[in-house]
């Protein structure tokens, strides 16, 4: 059973338990997502919590779903983890990220962000990005379609904006083979790429070094 943190709203929380990595970038198995019993579906806004290395953390989900969808469109997963972590736990996580021999690096952060994404978008991270990119490339067509259905994406949570984009894309295919192709295009996981210990999705080694420096700077400035 999922427990809660005193003083925090259960309805705004979702628990994603993660196994503990034994070294940077290693030992983190694919976590199992569990839902709080009093909420069905993704979170609208609030916190999505997870346990890592025996500690509780939470991603703070903003109310503006279009902002979150833009992050997915751009593949900007660091906006979820580490920079989207709630203020009460962000510094602890950044301290782990800044520790060169600690259990957290950008690869671990990426894994956590990907596992948290369905609790935010209602679909896998890569699907959210593909749907958002399609909407962005044809915003006039998507927006006019949404208006005729009585839906305004402004102010809606990310999972509702994403769901509307899915409905728009699906409404534009008629043949079964085209529908199957669309589903495959949207939902198939990215093909695995050759990885080394120094590479992480979306970052070159130089960019990783810059990210670690940013973590150090954030700690030094006492950033919220």
Image (cartoon, rainbow, N blue to C red):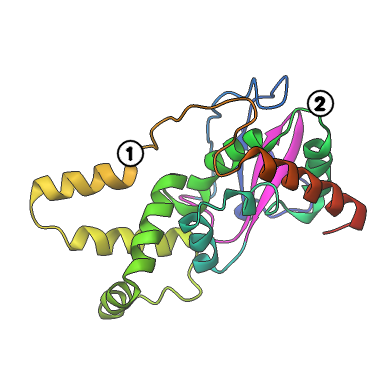
Among the 4 quarters of the image, the one containing residue 200: top right
Can residue 2 be seen in this snapshot? no
In x, y percent, where is residue 22?
Answer: 72, 19
| Residue for point 73% across, 33% down | 104
The answer to if 113 sits in the magenta stretch is no
Left/right placement of residue 133 relative to residue 22 reads left
Q: Are marks 1 and 2 in contact (CB under 8 Å)?
A: no
Nearest to the observer: residue 94 or residue 55: 94
**Circle 2 SS class:** loop
Magenta stretch: helix, strand or loop mostly: strand
**Among the two numbered marks 1 and 2 on one chain, the one whose residue lies closer to the N terminus:** 2
Task: Indicate whether 96 appears above or below 84.
Answer: above
Q: Which residues are magenta?
A: 40-61
Task: Indicate whether 147 appears above or below 186.
Answer: below
Q: Which residue is mark 2?
A: 101
For the N terminus, give its image quadrant.
Answer: top right
In x, y percent, where is residue 166?
Answer: 31, 58
| Residue for point 88% across, 50% down | 219
**Circle 1 SS class:** loop
Foreground tag (1 vs 2): 2
In x, y percent, where is residue 144?
Answer: 28, 79
Left/right placement of residue 5 relative to residue 75 reads right
Can residue 100 be seen in this snapshot? yes
Left/right placement of residue 99 relative to residue 84 reads right
């Amino acid at each position: 059973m999922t427990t809660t943190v005193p003083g925090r709203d259960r309805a705004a929380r979702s628990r994603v338990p993660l196994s503990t990595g034994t070294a940077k970038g290693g030992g983190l198995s694919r976590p199992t997502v569990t839902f709080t019993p009093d909420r069905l579906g993704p979170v609208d806004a609030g916190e999505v919590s997870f346990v890592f290395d025996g500690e509780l953390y939470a991603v703070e989900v903003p109310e503006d779903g279009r902002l979150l969808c833009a992050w997915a469109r751009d593949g900007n997963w660091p906006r979820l983890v580490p920079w989207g972590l709630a203020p009460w736990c962000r510094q602890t996580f950044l301290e782990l990220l800044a520790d060169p021999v600690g259990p957290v690096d950008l690869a671990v952060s990426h894994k956590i962000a990907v596992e948290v994404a369905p609790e935010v978008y209602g679909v896998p991270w890569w699907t959210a990005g593909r749907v958002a990119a399609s909407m962005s490339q044809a915003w006039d067509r998507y927006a006019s379609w949404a208006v005729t259905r009585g839906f305004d994406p402004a102010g809606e949570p990310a999972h509702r904006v994403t769901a509307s984009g899915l409905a728009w894309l699906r409404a534009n295919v008629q043949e079964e083979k085209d529908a199957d192709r669309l589903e495959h295009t949207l939902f198939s996981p990215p093909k695995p790429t050759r990885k080394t210990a120094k590479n992480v999705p979306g970052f070159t080694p130089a960019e990783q070094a810059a990210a670690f420096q940013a973590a150090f700077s954030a700690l030094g400035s006492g950033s919220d």
